[in-house]
Image (cartoon, rainbow, N blue to C red):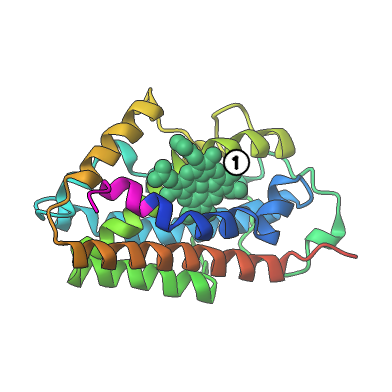
Amino acid sequence: MDTPFSTLIRVASHEAHTEAETSTFMSDLLGGRLGVDAYTRYTEQLWFVYRALEEAAEALRDDPVAGPFIQPELMRTAELERDLAHLYGGAGGHPDGDADTDNGHGNGNGNGNGDWRTGLTPLPATAAYAARIAECARDWPAGYVAHHYTRYLGDLSGGQIIRDRAEKAWGFACKGDGVRFYVFEEIPNPAAFKRGYRELLDRVEVDDLEKQRIVEECKRAFAFNSAVFHELGARFPLSA
Ligand code: HEM
């Protein structure tokens, strides 16, 4: 009954985590079976998600529940923009010789001049995810915390595995352009940072019912991520 909130939320989302982690798209991506175009599409989706998270951040800075979580060293939008400029600029090379992974669903922005924003639209699942984050930020800061936790603590954890695989699969420089999203320059000790983050979770001052609602929103956040993977997977099927 006195389970720390950080434990509650981790345990409650464990199953959803396994589901997201082992999704076909993630497995194929991390298994090196997809081309850099799939990685680019995925990075684009992240950009929409982090814009929603971070556009709301300033307004939540003084919120009693969400405020303590707003930390500049976590912000990812600038890093994603740098990665996308690199991915579109083509400087990272496109060692993707596998025609099956390029099924014509590119968005036509790969014009090599880094103007990746033009015409960029989110997948339906991404749009729904970003809209939900914005809604929480506006109407329910405690719900925003669920989304904040799901993304940033994940990036500080499994994100490092993704970076390593991406560097190897598509030849990005170690911690360089293309994978900057996964590099938290201002967090030299992620394990210590995560401990501090869990302490913040444990100090959230809401009643048990509200904690339960946050946990449910966290599961929803994972479900949004799985839905994005699902839609990406449909666009990048492996040939049988
Ligand atoms: C293949 C993809 C993934 C891998 C390999 C992975 C791996 C990991 C690992 C190893 C940890 C444990 C870190 C620790 O104990 O300190 C972790 C934690 C976490 N992951 Fe993932 N993960 C992946 C995908 C995801 C996704 C898609 C999300 C949600 C968007 C996510 C959210 C989280 C969260 C919130 C935690 C922190 C749990 C906690 O300690 O409270 N992960 N992940």
Q: Which x, y percent locates residue 228?
A: 55, 66
Q: Which residue is nearer to you in this view: 198 or 140?
A: 198
- In percent of width and height, residue 25 lies at 68, 59
Mark 1 secondary-structure assignment: helix
Residue at far right of view: 240
- Residue at 76% from the left image edge and 52% from the top image edge: 34
Can residue 98 be seen?
yes
Q: Which residues are magenta?
A: 1-9
Front residue (pair 53, 121)? 53
How many numbered badges does the structure rendering display?
Answer: 1
**Quadrant of res 127:** bottom left
Image coordinates of residue 214 in percent, x first then y, are 28, 63
Q: Quadrant of residue 9?
A: bottom left
Is 48 contained in the magenta span? no
Tell me the quarter of the image containing the C terminus.
bottom right
Cβ at disc 1 under 8 Å from ligand 1:
yes
Residue drawn at (87%, 64%) of the image? 239
Taking 233 as reference, is 211 left or right? left
Q: Can residue 186 be seen here?
A: no
Kind of residue at disc 1: Ile
**In the foreground, 50 or 200:** 200
- Residue at coordinates 31% horizontally, 46% vertically from top-left? 6
